[in-house]
C-alpha cells in the first residue's frame, strides 16, 4: 500500500544551501555522494553570503570537478523560499543525467524535455507552482513559444557552450544536404546581393572555389530585398519557419552567412532580452567550466553585465590525468594507422568532430577495428550514453558535442579530438576564415578543446588518452600562445604529449600508451615525474586580445539590442564605443567587422548628409582595420557611396589581364595552358609543380617566374612594385612531421634575394613568403625564427585557387575577348576576378591565414 501521513505545506528554510544539504530534510539515496568537496562548499556558501541578489552571476567550476550538485543545491535552496526554479542543460541527454543526480541527492525535480505535448501535466504543474525544480533544455526556453514558467531562478549548466546552444537558436540555419529546396528558395531571395557569377556557382554543381568559402551579406542595406528575404523565410516549412519567428521582430538587424553548403541568418549577439522566460527571471546563474576574460558569456547570452565568481584558488581537486598523443608527428607520418592501433588497445573510443553528424560517424568507422561496433548520434539518442559506457567495445563518433557527456572510470579510456573546433556554424567560419577575427573565437575554441579532452576524466583518479588528430588542430597546439592560455596542468600534459610524439617511432608511442593505460608503477615513476617537470615551468598567460574583447563585450551587447529595436543611430554610436575598446593589434580583423556594422547602422539611421558621410567614413575605416579584409569588397555598397577602390596590386593585375585579352590571344592555347596548370598543381612531381605555380601567377596578372639559383623559391609573383609573393612547396616527408628550421631560415631570405635581383634595397612592404604543405606544421621552438611575413598554407588551397582562376579565364575567353570596349572590359575583368576570389589581394588573403611566427 502507499505511504500515508500528514502532508506539510510549509517547507523548512535554511540560512545556506550547505546547511540544507547537511540536514535530514533531503531524502538522499544510498548512492548519494558522501559529502561535498571543499570547493563545492565554497561556491554555494559564497553565493548565499554575497550573490543572492545578483541578476546575472557566473560560477566557475572546472570540468570534472562537479558543477551539477552545487547548481542543484542552489536551485533547491531558492525554490524552498518560493517561486519556480529552472535548471537548463544544452541537451536532453544531459538533462536526464541531471535529473538522475537530483533523485540521488534528494532534490525534488521534474524533467521537462522534448515536445511540450509529451510533458507530464502533473510535473508541469509542480514546476509552475514551485513544488519541484524544473529540469529542462536550452531549447525549451529559447524558442518562439516557450511553455516553461517565468522562473525566480534560472540556472544554465555548461554555460561556456552558450553560443552553440543560444546563439544558434536565434537564427535560421539551412543545410543544403538536408533541405536543398529551402536552400535554393532563400538563395533566390539573396540574388540581388550577388553577382551573376556568384549566383550561378552557388546554384549549380559544387566546385573547389565555391564549396567552402563563406561570404557575409547585410540585408538591411537593400530595403526591398530584405522584404523579399523575410517573405521567402516565412514560406518555408518547419523547422525553419519557427526559427524565423525567433528573429522576425528585429529581422532588419540580422546578418546572412552564405556558402555553397548552407545559409545561416542571425544577429551576431542573440536578442535574448526579447525572451520573457530569460529576461524576466529574477536571477540567472551560469555554471561554467571556465570564466574567460574575453566577454564570451556576455556575447553568447546577450547580457551586458555578468558578474563572475571564480573558484577560490587551490580548492578544486584535479580532474584526472590525460596523456596527449599527436599522431601527425609520428616518425614516418602515418598518423591514421597509429591512431587505429591505439584504439585497438581497448576497442573503445569517443571521437569528437566539428564536422557533420555523418562525417563524425565516418571518422569513428575509420578508426574502429573489425567487428567493433560503430555508433553515432542516432544510436546515442536511441540507446543513451550509458549503453555505450557499459559496453565492452565500440567507437562513438559525435559532431559538436564537446560538453555534457560523462564517461568516468573504465567507461572509455580513449578520446579522439578530430580537427580544430573553430567553425561550429557559418558565422564562426566567416570570422575565422574570412574576417581574420580568430581573436574573438579563441576563448570559445580553447573551451571546446578543454571540454572535449575532459570527457573521460571526470574525477581525480580518472585517466584517459587524448588523441589530437588533424593538421589544423596539431598546428593549433604548435603555437606557444595557445598552450600558455591553458591551465598549468593541462599545459604540462600537452607539452609532455608533444615531446613524446614528435619524431617517435609508432611502436614506441604505442608502448607508452599501453603503459599509461595500465597505469602502474612504470607510468608513475616515468611518465608522472616528467609531467611534473613540465608543470613546474608552466604558467597561464591570457592572450593580449582577451582584455580589450572583455571591455568591448557589454558595449557590443547594447549595440545589438539597439539594432534589433531599429534604433540605428544609437546602435552605431554604441558600436563605435565598442570599437574604441577593441584596440589591440591582435583584434584587427574583428575590429574591422564591428566598424563595418557601425557604418551600415549609421547609414540606416542617417537623417542628413553629415551622418551619411560619417557612415561612409566608418566603412572606409573598416577596410583599414581589416588588414587583409577582402570580404569587404564583396559587400553591396551603401547607397550613394562610390565603388570601393582597388588595391594597387589589384589594379596592376586587372590592367595586365585586360592587355593580354586585347592582344594577340590564342584561345585554344590558353585553354590548354589552364588545363595543364590545374593538372600540374594536382600532382607532386617537383619540376612540373613549379611550372604550375608560375603559370598560376601569370594567370593572376603577375610577372611570374622560377628564380634562378640554389635555395630559391619555387615561384615568385610580382605585381609591379605594389606587391610580391614567393611560394615554396614542401612535399617531402620529415621524420617528425614538422617543418625543419632550415626551411624557415631559407624562407626568411627569399624576398631579400628577389629584391637583390631587381637592384632594390627591399621588397614592397608586407610582401608574403608562403610555404606550401599538406601535412606539416612548425615546431614551437623553431617558429619564432620566422620573419613576420612567412606563412604556412595548404596545397589544397592552391588547387582551389587554380580552379577559381580557370573559371575566371573561361569567362574571359568566352565573353571578354574583342567584344567589349576597353573600359567595359576593365570593369568586367574586375567583376569576374572579385566574384571568383582571384584579385591578388584575395589570393594573398587565402594563402596567408596561418603566420608561422607566434604572437603576430
Image: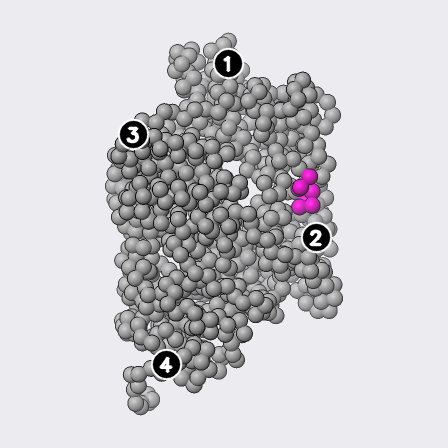
Question: Which span is picked out in magenta?
Answer: 779-785
Q: Nearer the viewer, residue 349 or 408?
A: 408
User: Can you tell which of label 3 and label 4 is closer to the viewer?
Assistant: 3
Which residue does the numbered mark 2 point to in the structure image?
Answer: 499
Question: Which residue carries the number 4 mark?
Answer: 13
Could you tell me which residue is drawn at 40 percent across and 37 percent down?
A: 596
Q: Earlier in the sequence, mark 1 or mark 3?
A: 3
Q: Of the numbered discs in the image, which one, if any, rests on residue 660?
A: 1
Q: Is residue 470 placed above or below 309 in the rendered structure?
A: above
Of badges 1 and 2, nearer the viewer stands 2
Comparing labels 4 and 1, the label whose residue is closer to the camera: 4
User: Going from the N terminus, do you reach mark 3 or mark 4 first?
Assistant: 4
Res 609 label: 3
- Is residue 410 visible in the rendered image? The answer is no
The local crowd at label 1, few if under 14, some if 14 to 19, many if 20 or more residues have their Cα within 10 Å, is: some
Residue 448: % across, % down: 51, 55
Instruction: Give percent across and percent down for residue 367.
Output: 58, 53
Q: Nearer the viewer, residue 762 or 146?
A: 762
Distance (Cα) linking label 4 and label 1: 85 Å
Disc 3 residue crowd, few under 14, some 14–19, many 20+, Cα 10 Å: few
The answer to which image quadrant residue 712 occupies is top right
Amino acid at each position: 500500500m502507499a505511504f500515508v501521513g500528514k502532508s506539510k505545506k510549509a517547507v523548512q528554510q535554511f540560512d545556506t544551501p550547505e546547511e540544507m544539504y547537511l540536514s535530514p530534510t533531503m531524502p538522499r539515496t544510498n548512492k548519494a555522494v558522501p559529502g561535498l568537496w571543499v570547493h563545492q562548499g565554497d561556491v554555494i556558501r559564497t553565493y548565499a553570503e554575497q550573490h543572492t541578489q545578483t541578476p546575472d552571476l557566473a560560477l566557475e567550476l572546472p570540468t570534472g570537478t562537479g558543477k551539477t550538485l552545487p547548481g542543484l543545491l542552489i536551485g533547491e535552496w531558492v525554490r524552498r523560499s518560493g517561486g519556480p526554479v529552472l535548471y537548463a542543460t544544452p541537451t536532453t541527454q544531459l538533462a536526464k543525467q541531471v535529473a538522475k543526480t537530483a533523485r540521488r541527492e534528494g532534490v525534488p525535480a521534474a524533467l521537462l524535455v522534448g515536445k511540450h505535448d509529451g510533458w507530464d501535466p502533473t510535473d508541469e504543474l509542480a514546476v509552475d507552482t514551485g513544488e519541484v525544480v524544473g529540469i529542462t533544455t536550452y531549447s525549451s526556453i529559447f524558442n518562439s513559444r516557450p511553455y516553461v514558467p517565468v522562473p525566480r531562478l534560472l540556472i544554465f549548466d555548461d554555460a561556456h557552450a552558450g553560443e552553440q546552444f543560444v546563439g544558434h537558436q536565434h537564427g535560421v540555419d539551412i543545410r543544403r544536404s538536408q533541405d536543398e529546396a529551402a536552400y535554393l528558395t532563400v538563395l533566390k531571395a539573396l540574388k540581388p546581393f550577388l553577382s551573376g557569377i556568384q549566383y550561378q556557382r552557388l546554384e549549380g554543381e559544387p566546385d573547389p572555389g565555391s564549396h567552402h568559402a563563406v561570404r557575409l551579406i547585410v540585408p538591411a542595406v537593400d530595403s526591398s530585398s530584405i522584404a523579399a528575404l523575410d517573405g521567402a523565410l516565412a514560406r518555408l516549412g518547419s523547422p525553419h519557419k519557427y526559427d524565423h519567428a525567433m528573429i522576425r521582430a528585429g529581422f532588419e538587424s540580422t546578418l546572412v552567412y552564405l556558402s555553397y553548403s548552407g545559409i545561416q541568418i542571425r544577429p551576431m549577439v542573440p536578442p535574448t532580452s526579447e525572451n520573457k522566460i530569460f529576461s524576466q527571471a529574477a536571477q540567472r546563474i551560469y555554471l561554467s567550466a571556465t570564466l574567460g576574460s574575453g566577454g564570451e558569456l556576455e556575447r553568447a547570452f546577450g547580457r551586458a553585465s555578468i558578474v563572475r565568481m571564480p573558484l577560490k584558488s587551490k580548492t578544486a581537486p584535479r580532474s584526472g590525468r590525460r596523456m596527449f598523443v599527436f599522431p601527425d608527428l609520428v616518425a614516418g607520418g602515418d598518423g591514421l594507422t597509429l591512431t587505429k592501433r591505439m584504439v585497438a588497445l581497448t576497442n573503445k573510443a569517443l571521437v569528437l568532430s566539428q564536422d557533420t553528424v555523418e562525417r563524425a560517424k565516418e571518422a569513428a568507422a575509420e578508426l574502429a577495428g573489425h567487428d567493433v561496433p560503430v555508433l553515432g548520434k542516432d544510436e546515442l539518442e536511441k540507446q543513451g550514453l550509458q549503453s555505450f559506457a557499459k559496453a565492452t567495445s565500440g567507437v562513438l563518433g559525435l559532431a559538436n558535442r564537446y560538453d555534457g557527456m560523462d564517461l568516468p572510470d573504465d567507461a572509455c579510456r580513449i578520446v579522439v579530438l578530430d580537427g580544430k573546433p573553430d567553425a561550429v556554424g557559418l558565422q564562426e567560419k566567416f570570422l575565422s576564415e574570412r574576417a581574420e577575427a580568430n581573436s574573438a573565437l579563441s576563448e570559445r575554441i580553447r573551451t571546446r578543446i578543454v571540454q572535449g579532452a575532459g570527457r573521460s576524466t571526470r574525477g581525480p583518479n580518472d585517466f584517459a588518452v587524448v588523441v589530437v588528430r588533424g593538421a589544423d588542430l596539431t598546428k593549433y597546439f604548435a603555437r606557444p600562445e595557445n598552450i600558455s592560455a591553458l591551465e598549468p596542468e593541462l599545459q604540462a600534459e600537452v607539452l609532455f604529449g608533444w615531446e613524446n610524439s614528435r619524431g617517435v617511432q609508432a611502436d614506441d608511442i604505442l608502448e607508452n600508451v599501453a603503459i599509461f593505460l595500465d597505469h602502474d608503477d612504470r607510468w608513475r615513476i616515468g611518465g608522472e615525474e616528467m609531467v611534473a617537470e613540465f608543470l613546474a615551468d608552466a604558467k597561464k598567460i591570457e592572450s593580449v586580445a582577451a582584455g580589450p574583447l572583455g571591455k568591448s563585450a557589454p558595449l557590443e551587447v547594447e549595440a545589438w539590442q539597439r539594432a534589433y529595436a531599429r534604433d540605428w543611430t544609437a546602435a552605431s554610436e554604441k558600436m563605435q564605443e565598442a570599437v574604441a575598446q577593441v584596440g589591440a593589434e591582435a583584434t584587427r580583423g574583428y575590429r574591422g567587422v564591428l566598424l563595418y556594422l557601425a557604418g551600415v547602422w549609421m547609414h540606416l539611421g542617417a537623417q542628413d548628409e553629415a551622418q551619411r558621410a560619417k557612415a561612409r567614413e566608418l566603412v572606409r575605416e573598416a577596410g583599414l582595420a581589416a588588414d587583409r579584409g577582402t570580404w569587404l569588397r564583396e559587400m553591396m555598397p551603401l547607397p550613394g557611396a562610390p565603388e570601393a577602390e582597388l588595391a594597387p596590386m589589384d589594379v596592376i593585375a586587372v590592367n595586365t589581364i585586360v592587355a593580354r585579352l586585347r592582344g594577340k590571344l590564342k584561345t585554344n592555347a590558353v585553354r590548354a595552358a589552364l588545363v595543364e596548370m590545374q593538372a600540374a598543381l594536382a600532382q607532386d612531381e617537383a619540376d612540373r609543380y613549379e611550372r604550375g605555380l608560375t603559370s598560376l601567377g601569370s594567370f593572376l596578372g603577375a610577372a611570374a617566374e622560377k628564380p634562378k639559383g640554389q635555395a630559391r623559391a619555387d615561384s615568385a609573383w610580382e605585381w609591379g612594385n605594389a606587391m610580391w609573393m614567393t611560394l615554396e612547396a614542401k612535399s617531402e616527408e620529415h621524420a617528425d612531421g614538422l617543418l625543419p628550421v632550415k626551411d624557415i631560415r631559407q624562407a626568411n631570405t627569399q624576398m631579400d634575394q628577389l629584391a637583390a635581383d631587381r637592384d632594390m634595397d627591399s621588397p614592397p612592404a608586407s610582401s608574403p613568403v608562403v610555404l606550401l604543405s599538406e601535412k606539416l606544421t612548425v615546431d614551437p621552438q623553431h617558429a619564432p625564427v620566422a620573419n613576420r611575413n612567412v606563412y604556412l598554407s595548404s596545397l589544397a588551397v592552391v588547387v582551389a585557387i587554380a580552379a577559381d582562376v580557370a573559371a575566371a579565364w573561361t569567362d574571359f575567353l568566352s565573353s571578354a575577348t574583342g567584344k567589349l570596349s576597353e573600359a567595359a572590359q576593365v570593369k568586367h575583368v574586375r567583376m569576374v576576378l572579385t566574384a571568383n576570389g582571384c584579385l591578388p589581394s584575395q589570393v594573398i588573403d587565402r594563402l596567408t591565414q596561418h603566420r608561422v611566427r607566434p604572437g603576430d
